[in-house]
Amino acid sequence: MRVKVSRSVDLEEIPKNIADFLEESRQILLRVTSDMEDSYAALTSKDKHTVPVAVQKLDGVRKKLGRVDSDLKDYMDHLVAYVNISKQLEEATVSAASTQPQEAGGQGEN
């Protein structure tokens, strides 16, 4: 059974954390490629007894792809949130910076 686990990280760490998770997914996909090759070899073999091996491998491929798909959705959700928050912080910083000189200039003229 898969469960979601939450933890807090600094905002600037999010891209690196997602990259690390993405590497895990990449490794799973490499194994999927190997399992697909094994399935192909089993199905193209002259030995009919290798078909169950292909069935087993393909079931594993399907499950791994489902896991990667779910994980990629989670990664994307986190990255979209990161982009949105970063944009909001940038806009707030620009807005604050643009109002400071006006306030200081207005006070200096009196």
Image (cartoon, grey):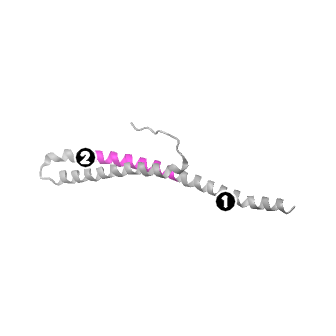
Q: Is residue 7 left or right of residue 42?
A: right
- Is residue 30 shown in magenta? no
Nearer-N-terminus badge (2/1): 2
Residue for badge 1: 94
Could you say whether the residue bearing mark 1 is in a helix, strand or loop?
helix
Q: Residue at x 28, y 45 (%)?
A: 59
Q: Residue at x 33, y 52 (%)?
A: 29
Where on the picture, by quarter, is residue 105?
bottom right
Placement of the C terminus among the 4 image quadrants: bottom right
What is the crowding at mark 1: few (fewer than 14 residues within 10 Å), some, or many (at least 20)? few
Residue 77: x, y in percent?
Answer: 50, 50
Q: Is residue 1 above or below residue 57?
A: above
Residue 77 visible? The answer is no
Residue for badge 2: 57
Q: Is residue 96 left or right of residue 28?
A: right
For the residue pair 87 and 11, the one nearer the viewer reads as 11
Q: Amino acid at mark 1?
A: Val
Q: How far apart are labels 2 and 1 at the CA level?
A: 54 Å
What is the crowding at mark 2: few (fewer than 14 residues within 10 Å), some, or many (at least 20)? many
> Magenta residues?
58-79
Q: Is residue 44 left or right of residue 67?
A: left
Asked if labels 1 and 2 touch by Cβ distance under 8 angstroms, the answer is: no
Q: Is residue 80 left or right of residue 42?
A: right
